[in-house]
Image (cartoon, rainbow, N blue to C red):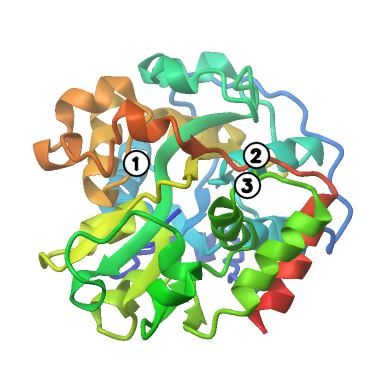
Amino acid sequence: MRVRLTAVLLVGALALAACGREVGQDTADGDPDDGQTAAEGGEEVSCDVDETDGDLLLYNWSEYMDPDLLTAFADEHGVAATEDTFTSNEALLAQIRAGGADYDVIIPSDYMVAIMIEEGLLLPLDADALPNTDNVSGDFMSPPYDPDLTYSRPYQWGTTGLGVNTDATGPDPEATWGWLFDEQMREGLRISMLDDPREGMGAALYYLGYDPNTTDESELQEAADLVANNDQIVTFTSDQFTELLIGGETDIGQGFSGNFLDNFEEDNYVYLIPEEGATIWTDNMAILNTTSSPCTAHTFINFILDAENGAQLTNWTWYASPNEAATEFLDEEVRENPSIYPDESVRENLYFLENTGEAERLYTDLFTRAQG
C-alpha cells in the first residue's frame, strides 16, 4: 500500500501517449457495488518466458514502485512502462469497474484479489511464464484469497499501525489503538486516520475486541460510532499521513508500516503495531482480463519476482518482501528491522482482511457516514 514522500516518476509517458492508451486518474471513492457489470472472466493465455506483446501500463499504489526498476524493465525488454496510481482498494475496484485506462498489471491487496476473482476481472496466469515464482517464500504460496496462485503473485507485505510523535505522547508510548479511541489517551492530540473503509473500521474493531472481518451490523455500527465521536481526528488520508505527522500537523497517524519507517529520520517518531491486533496485508500482482499485453504483463511479474529485483524493491519501499531468494540482497537496516519483519510473537496477533461479501457495502456506508 503504499505511499512514499519522494516524487512520482512516470516512465515512458510519451511512448504511452503515442500508442494511444489513456492514463486514468484516481477519482473514485470506491463504492463496491457501483459501476459497470463485471467481466465474466478472462481466457487463459500462453506466453514464453520474457515474451512481450506490447507496452505495459501498471496500476499501483502511490509511490510503491522504485522508478529505477520500472526504467530497467522498459530498457531490458524494449517496451514503454508507465505507472498510474490509486489510494485504496475500493478506488481501484471502482476504476476497473468503470472502464477507463487499459491497465495490464494491477496491485490489489489480499481481500480485493478475492473480490476481483469472484467478479471475473482477472486473467488466469500462465505459470510456465513465471519461473521466478520459485523464489517466493512458502508462507505466500497458498494464500486464502487465491489458494493455488491461479490469478496472482505476491508483491510486498506489511502491517497497518500507528505512527507516533513521542514529543506529544511522551516516551515509550503504549502499542494500542487507544491512542485513537480512548478519550483520556487521545486528549489534546491531533489524529489522522486512513481514508479507507476496511482499515478505518478495522482499527475500531480491533480496539473493541471484535473480528476485523465481522459482518455483524451491530458491531460495525459500534465501530463506526467510535470513529464518528472522535473529535480529535483532523483528517482522513491514505496518502499524506506521514507527511502530516513529520510536518507537525498531526501527532498520531494511522498508516502503513513502510511509509512511516522509510521517512522517520528523527528519534521522536516511532511506529507501533497495536497489541489488541492489527492488519497484516499482502499486496499482489495480477493481470486484468482486458489487458492488451498479456505476455508483457507476465514478463513484468516475473521480472519483479527476480531475487535481486525483489530486494531492490524492498530496499526502496521499506515494505517486507515475500521473495525468500531476495533476503541475501536486502540492506541490513531493512532485513534486521523488527517493524518491517515482525517476530513470531507479534505476527500471532496480526490478521488479514477478508472479503466480507455483501457486508463490503456496509463497511463503506458506515465509515463514510462516520467521517461526517
Residue to which mark 2 is pinned: 113
**Label 2 Cα neighbours within 10 Å, binned few <14 / some 14-19 / many ≥20:** many
> What residue appears at the point 40 percent right and 20 percent down from the top-left corner?
136
C-alpha separation, residue under disc 3 versus residue under disc 2: 18 Å
**Label 3 Cα neighbours within 10 Å, binned few <14 / some 14-19 / many ≥20:** many
C-alpha separation, residue under disc 2 versus residue under disc 1: 25 Å
> What residue appears at the point 44 percent right and 63 percent down from the top-left corner?
178
Residue type, numbered disc 2? Val
What label sits on residue 239 in the rendered view? none
What secondary structure is marked by label 1?
helix
Tell me: 35 left or right of 54: right
> What residue appears at the point 59 percent right and 22 percent down from the top-left corner?
149
Name the residue nearer the viewer: 221 or 17. Answer: 221
Location of residue 6 by image quarter: bottom left
Residue to which mark 1 is pinned: 73
Asked if disc 2 and disc 1 are in contact, CB closer than 8 Å, the reply is no
Would you place residue 317 above or below residue 286 in this image?
A: below
Tell me: 178 left or right of 164: right
Residue type, numbered disc 3? Pro
Kindly tell me whether residue 124 is visible in this rendering.
yes
**Residue 195 screen position, x and y as percent:** 56, 70
Would you place residue 169 above or below residue 117 in this image?
A: below
Residue to which mark 3 is pinned: 212
**Residue 369 screen position, x and y as percent:** 73, 77
Tell me: 325 left or right of 19: left
Location of residue 252 by image quarter: bottom left
Q: Quadrant of the C terminus?
A: bottom right
